[in-house]
């Protein structure tokens, strides 16, 4: 609760105490308290990452993965979602401290497990699978495997589109963020013209959202369009004309500031 209201520095020692107490309980009754210990470690890793103590967050996150792996080995149906989630969190913690190649491998396993879960219960786990695909595309891009990132990002866009079709209010923001992420991956692969369609679609559709949600999506899409224009002005202007029926606006010709999707 402290972490959620921005008081992460105060939250960390409280979380440490929770981990210590769950560790004590698990030592007395492992079957009963191992899940609580695993969850508390996951929470503590997130708090440490939040306050910039990423190096300390990684071992806590890795221990959570190990414990959820142990639990899933005993009861796969009950703990597979927790194991997949802890792997995805661990990948993010690893990426935060620059261990990106390891993060890709860990997130690949999370992606595999979420795909397994979605095959069993598509409605329940499709959002997790889409999120994991988005994360994986970003990680691939950051380790120089941009060509592999493109189809992964495309799949995330497809799944978020499916989710938005089922529940537009709930999933449209994430669907539009996945479009901007796809645009970024295309730009990173020097496919500047191809990036115009998803980025323009995100920019226009975001206007339907409440301003506090739309602002960041519009800002990202607009700056990525500037980045694409800077990469190949003629091709991007031509594609923008095809997509919108309009000439490139003045704001797209301004210097871009976007460096990440």
Image: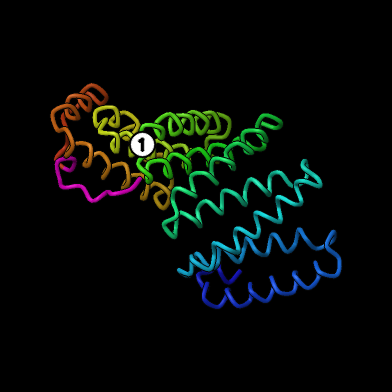
Left or right: residue 143 compared with residue 33? left
Task: Please say whether residue 169 is visible from this viewpoint.
Answer: no
**Badge 1: residue crowd in 10 Å (few <14, some 14–19, many ≥20):** many
Left or right: residue 201 compared with residue 16? left
Placement of 215 over or under 34, stated as above or below: above
Image-quadrant location for residue 27:
bottom right
Picture coordinates of residue 221 (x, y %)? 31, 41
Picture coordinates of residue 87 (x, y %)? 60, 49
Residue range in magenta is 251-261
Q: Quadrant of the C terminus?
A: top left
Residue in the picture at 16% in, 33% down: 232
The colour scheme is: rainbow
| Residue at image mark 1 | 146
Residue in the picture at 53% in, 41% down: 131
Placement of 57 over or under 230, stated as above or below: below
**Residue 228 or 85: which is nearer the viewer?**
85
**Magenta-span inclusion, residue 258:** yes
| Secondary structure mostly taken by the magenta-highlighted segment of the chain | loop
**Residue 185 or 225: which is nearer the viewer?**
185
């Amino acid at each position: 609760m402290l972490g959620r209201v921005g008081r992460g520095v105060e939250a960390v020692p409280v979380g440490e105490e929770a981990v210590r107490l769950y560790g004590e309980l698990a030592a007395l009754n492992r079957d009963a308290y191992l899940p609580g210990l695993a969850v508390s470690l996951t929470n503590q890793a997130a708090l440490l990452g939040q306050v910039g103590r990423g190096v300390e967050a990684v071992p806590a996150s890795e221990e959570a993965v190990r414990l959820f792996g142990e639990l899933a080995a005993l009861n796969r149906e009950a703990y597979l979602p927790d194991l997949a989630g802890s792997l995805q969190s661990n990948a993010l913690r690893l990426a935060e401290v620059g261990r990106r190649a390891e993060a890709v491998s860990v997130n690949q396993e999370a992606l595999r497990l979420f795909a397994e879960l979605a095959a069993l219960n598509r409605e329940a786990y499709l959002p997790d699978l889409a999120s994991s695909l988005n994360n994986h595309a970003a990680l691939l891009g950051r380790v120089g495997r941009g060509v592999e990132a493109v189809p992964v990002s495309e799949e995330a866009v497809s799944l978020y589109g499916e989710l938005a079709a089922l529940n537009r209010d709930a999933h449209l923001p994430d669907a539009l963020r996945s479009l901007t992420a796809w645009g970024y991956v295309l730009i990173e692969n020097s496919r500047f013209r191809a990036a115009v369609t998803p980025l323009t679609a995100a920019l226009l559709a975001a206007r339907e959202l409440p301003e506090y949600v739309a602002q960041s999506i519009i800002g990202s899409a607009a700056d990525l369009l500037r980045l694409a224009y800077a990469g190949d002005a003629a091709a991007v202007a031509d594609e923008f004309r095809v997509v919108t029926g309009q000439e490139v606006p003045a704001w797209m010709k301004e210097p871009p500031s976007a460096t990440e999707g």
